[in-house]
Amino acid sequence: MIASERTAWCTVAAVSGAIAVAAGAFGAHAVPAGSKAQQLLTTGATWQLLHTVALLASLALVPSRAVGICFTVGLVAFPGALYALALQGPSWLGAVAPVGGLAFLAGWLLVAVAAWRSRGI
């Protein structure tokens, strides 16, 4: 992976991390406690932050464009759908969340494949 590509993935991760923190703060302070909106925002922020860290770690351990793409698709689709639902978006957006979940799953499996191929982990 070339340096400019690594910089781009790190930028994606940094922006994703900032969005996750903002969504978590919004859920904690701007919506009614215990509401469905708060649950959706908390779940989205948790999964987004977890996979933001996974994206950064995968860059360091097994640099792979495919892993970056899968995690990025997941970072947009899964929490994005939950955030939209929390903000009264159209209910059909709920169907986008599983696409993000599958992208996360594919990313993790590709990390395993890359690690196996490199035998570096």
Image (tube, rainbow, N blue to C red):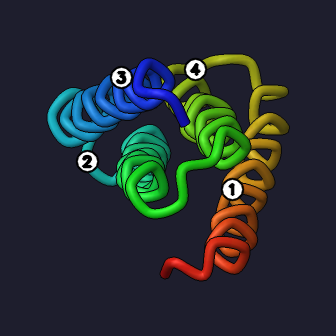
Examine the image and state in which quarter residue 65 appears.
Answer: top right
What residue does disc 4 label? 88
Q: Earlier in the sequence, mark 2 or mark 1?
A: 2
Q: Disc 4 versus disc 1: distance between alpha carbons?
A: 29 Å
Residue drawn where x is 54% and y is 50% of the image? 63
Residue 97 % position (x, y): 73, 42
Q: Which residue is mark 2?
A: 33
Picture mark count: 4
In this view of the protein, can residue 35 be seen by the observer? no
- Marks 4 and 2, how far apart at CA: 16 Å
Helix, strand or loop for disc 2: loop
Which residue is rendered at x = 60% and y = 82% of the image? 119
* Viewport quadrant of the N terminus: top right
Q: What amino acid does circle 3 point to?
A: Thr
Q: Residues within 10 Å of mark 1 (few under 14, many from 20)?
A: many
Instruction: Please tell me whether residue 64 is drawn above or below residue 94 in the rendered image.
Output: below
SS for dot 1: helix
Q: 121 above or below 105?
A: below
Q: Residues within 10 Å of mark 2 (few under 14, many from 20)?
A: few
- Place residue 80 in its image quadrant: top right
Q: Secondary structure at mark 3?
A: helix
Q: Secondary structure at mark 4?
A: loop
Query: According to the image, label 1 marks what residue?
Result: 107
Nearer to the camera, 37 or 6 = 6
Q: Earlier in the sequence, mark 4 or mark 1?
A: 4
Image x and y of residue 90, in percent? 74, 18
Q: Which residue is mark 3?
A: 11
Badge nearest the viewer, 3 or 4? 3
Residue at 33% x, 53% y: name it: 34
Viewer-nearest of discs 2 and 1:
1
